Amino acid sequence: MNKAKHEVLKRLRDWATSTKDISCIVVAGSHARKDHLPDEFSDIDVVIFSSNVKFYERNFDWINQIGEPVLYFKDQLGRNITGRKVYFSNGVGLDIFFLDEKSVRWSYLYTKASERKWLFALLPGAVKKMMRAGVLFFAEYIRRGFYCLVDKGKFNDRLCYIDARFKFRQEGFDREKLEHVINSFWRYALHTAINLQRRDFWHAKITCDHGMKKMLLVLVEIYTKITNGRDYDTWHHARFLEQWAAPFIVEKLPLIYGHYEMEDAWKCMKETADLFSEITRRIADHVTDLNLLNPEEYVRQWIEAMKVDKRVLV
């Protein structure tokens, strides 16, 4: 960790220590995990526990005590969680969100109660559902490591207990999700072809390089978990993809992006579709009796007809 990051964390610690309604700051992400360590460009991920979350959701003036903010925006992390991304003048990035300090205590109590069937049975269903959601959130957030920069209570002990009892589980195979991904991909492929035929290159780049690629990534994750087990880590947003994806996938990646030009755009769309099709076929080899609605054959025929037809659609 460089000097600038140390300074930001020191100021954050000093501010939290002297602020009564701040009870804990947890550092997670790359600066807390044991593998894939941070580099000089890595942001610092923190969650701040407070007894006055509503105030900090409205007021961001306190950030000036940590450094001079030069870039800032909000990010909706969940239905009731708003994150903030800020970059300071020294180049350090900070990802922040606030949680009610009671949330850890409730999650801890849920974890303890779940170990006693008679006690767990006494909890109303709605309460259990709410508390379980909190437990699963913490389990995912701290699963790769965390540490408490500030701890005015028993937050570290309780989070460690939650982490030990509720290990985060990766999502298992979902047939409906796979079918949705396949149909969404071929819809994007069809729209890409239509946009190219119209010479609407910008729209074509969006549908190909965002829509098709997004569905391709989800399919790569599904295939990877089918072949390596549900708990095989596929990270997020394609982080370290070259390390965890199958070699036949990685070697095709340089071919699936094209230039802002007709022939190259058609070519990269075809390469993307061919890779998606190959992964789909391999999934079918691993999962018996899949019986999915797969529109590939029809969409490929329609796309090929458009490519042959040199007229511009309107």
Image: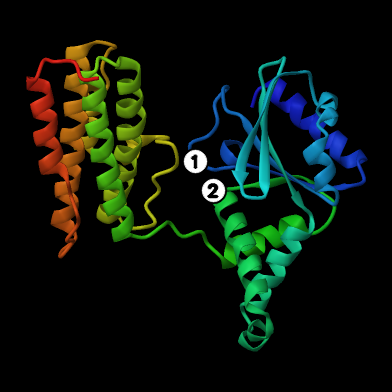
Work out which residue is located at the far bottom of the displayed protein and give it.
118
Residue 167 location (% of width, % of height): 52, 62
Residue under the point 34% across and 44% down: 218
Residue 163 location (% of width, % of height): 60, 60
Whether residue 256 is visible here, answered yes or no, is: no
Secondary structure at badge 1 equals loop
Query: Which sits earlier in the primary sequence, circle 2 or circle 1?
Result: 1
**Which residue is under mark 1?**
35
Amino acid at circle 1: Asp
Placement of 282 over or under 200, stated as above or below: below
Work out which residue is located at the far front of the displayed protein and give it.
314
Q: Is residue 129 left or right of residue 292?
A: right
Determine crowd level at label 2: few under 14, some 14-19, many 20+ residues with C-alpha closer than 10 A: some
Residue under the point 67% across and 41% down: 82
**Which residue is under mark 2?**
144
Determine crowd level at label 1: few under 14, some 14-19, many 20+ residues with C-alpha closer than 10 A: few
Residue 71 location (% of width, % of height): 68, 19
Asked whether 137 or 309 is in front, the reply is 309
Asked whether 42 or 268 is in front, the reply is 268
Residue under the point 20% across and 20% down: 313
Whether residue 250 is visible here, answered yes or no, is: yes
